[in-house]
Image (tube, helix red, strand yellow):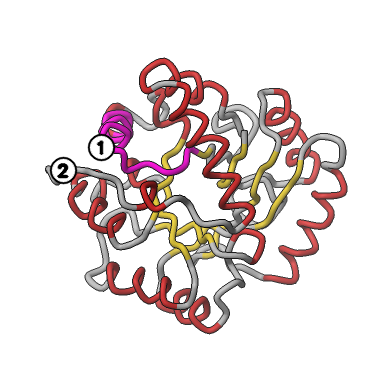
Amino acid sequence: MIDIHSHILPGVDDGAQSLEESVAMLRIAAQHGTTDIVATPHSNSQFRYNLQVIQDRFRALSAAAEGLLQVHLGCDFHLSYENVQDALENPTRYTINNLAYLMVELPDLFIPDPAADVLKRLRTVGIIPVITHPERNVVLAGKLDTLGQWVKDGCLMQITAQSLLGRFGPEAEQCAGALLRQDLVHFIASDAHDCEDRPPRLDLAYRHVTERYGAERAERLCKINPGRAVAGELLPVQEVQPWYRFWK
């Protein structure tokens, strides 16, 4: 499996705080079937995305991960004015492997009025926005019609593995299920922050999806689509423009 959202880079945000903890997280991921994992440190008002520091930590982690799994670099990109302007000027600065896919996090308590236009502007410079954990955003979770329109416009959706298992509460669990039923999910990722409470495991979610939606869906969301994101390859047209019905 391929995990495209994790906070395994040591000492740069609220995820792993040391190289030792990062390696312990990688061991957990590898032991439970993950072959590739993307380090996506935050870029927001609390955690500055210092590219030099991040690249140094990434090189150290990649060396320590040799023989365990393959580590890739991306960003958990907060949709702020400063970030967006920088991304428009430097389209591959924050994307996975400096290619096309950008993990985009929206504010928890409101959806900025120009969000749809901003996401479209990112698309014009070759960025493919992946909206992270919409099921955990109390505003987005109640606006599946908005999410459906964003998908129709070319955005993709990533839900958190533990949301399917109840870790983030019944509302997030129910929303994740609704998004899956509406075929509005393109990726499942761990959003791992540590070894115990939020570990880098996809296996339980993979099993959950297999049991409820079939093995083909689990393969697509945990292996095939994430593999395309890591390689910077486009998803098939039917993946980005599913047939869905709007509802609230």
Identity of the residue drawn at 29% across and 46% down? 242
User: Which residue is found at the position 70% from the left and 52% from the top?
Assistant: 72
- Badge 2 marks a residue whose secondary structure is loop
Q: Which residue is mark 2?
A: 245
**Residue 79 percent coordinates (x, y):** 41, 67
Residue carrying label 1: 182
Q: Is residue 195 left or right of residue 148?
A: right
Residue 60 horizontal side relative to residue 143, left or right: right
Q: Are marks 1 and 2 in contact (CB under 8 Å)?
A: yes
Please, what is the three-letter code of the amino acid marked with disc 2?
A: Arg
Q: Quadrant of residue 121?
A: bottom left
How many residues crowd mark 2 within 10 Å: few (<14), some (14–19), many (20+)?
Answer: few
Q: Image check: 76 left or right of 66?
A: left
Q: Position of residue 188 (x, y in %)?
A: 48, 38
Of 219 and 40, the residue lying toward us: 219
Segment colored magenta: 172-188
